[in-house]
Image (tube, grey):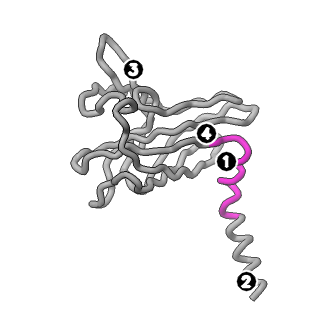
Amino acid sequence: MAMKRRVGWLGLLWWLLPVVSVWAGEIEIGDPWVREAPPTLQTSAAYMVIRNTGTVGKTVVGASSPLFARVEFHETMQQENMATMVGRDSLVIDAGGQVVLKPGGYHMMLIGPQGNKPLHAGDRVPLMLYLSDGAQVAVDAEVRVAPPERMGHDHQHMQHMH
């Protein structure tokens, strides 16, 4: 019986090792959340702070979620009094630096909800961030209703550029 328990713990530690080494060693995620969206809207947005506590710059080159068909990086920019969303291929986090994903700035677009269950405040959205060095960072984001002062611009009225 003790042998099975030891093998189970070793298997769990082996599975967690890549995530723990990234989380503890270099990449930290702060305040991850996803905007609650009406059930008819085919997109939502995820926000968080990605910190690089290491001595070497890191690049996030992709993201995914089992709850959405695609996850893309976008940046909201103001051009001639109009909010424009520009697609970004990656996010560079300098050594000792951070990138803040927030309404009205960098964010992750969650596109094509999978399944028929709409997301409501309090639900959880699993996300996986992929780094250029092959590391992966698991993120558990809470669905929230964005308060008016944090709303930024409505994605339905934005011009999209890639």
Tell me the crowding category of disc 4: few under 14, some 14 to 19, or many 20 or more residues within 10 angstroms, Cα based: few
Left or right of 79, for residue 54: right
Which residue is situated farthest in the top direction here? 80
Front residue (pair 54, 153): 153
Q: Amino acid at mark 4?
A: Ser
Tell me the crowding category of disc 1: few under 14, some 14 to 19, or many 20 or more residues within 10 angstroms, Cα based: some
| Residue identifier under label 3 | 77
Mark 4 or mark 2, earlier in chain = 2
| Residue identifier under label 1 | 23
From the viewer's perspective, is residue 9 above or below residue 22? below
Specify the segment rendered in magenta.
14-28
| Residue identifier under label 2 | 4
Q: Amino acid at mark 1?
A: Trp
Q: Gap in Å between the C-alphas at discs 2 and 1?
A: 28 Å
Residue 50 drawn in magenta: no
Main SS, magenta residues: helix
Q: Position of residue 39 (x, y in %)?
A: 25, 51
The residue depicted at 34 percent of the width and 14 percent of the height is 79
Q: Position of residue 53 (x, y in %)?
A: 71, 36
Looking at the rendered image, the quarter that the C terminus falls into is top left
Left or right of 26, for residue 146: left
Mark 4 or mark 2: which is in front?
A: 2
Mark 2 or mark 3, earlier in chain = 2
Mark 4 or mark 1, earlier in chain = 1
Disc tally is: 4
Mark 3 or mark 4: which is in front?
A: 3
The residue depicted at 33 percent of the width and 22 percent of the height is 84
Q: Amino acid at mark 2?
A: Lys
Secondary structure found at label 2: helix
Mark 4 or mark 1: which is in front?
A: 1
Q: Position of residue 25 (x, y in %)?
A: 73, 44
Mark 2 or mark 1, earlier in chain = 2
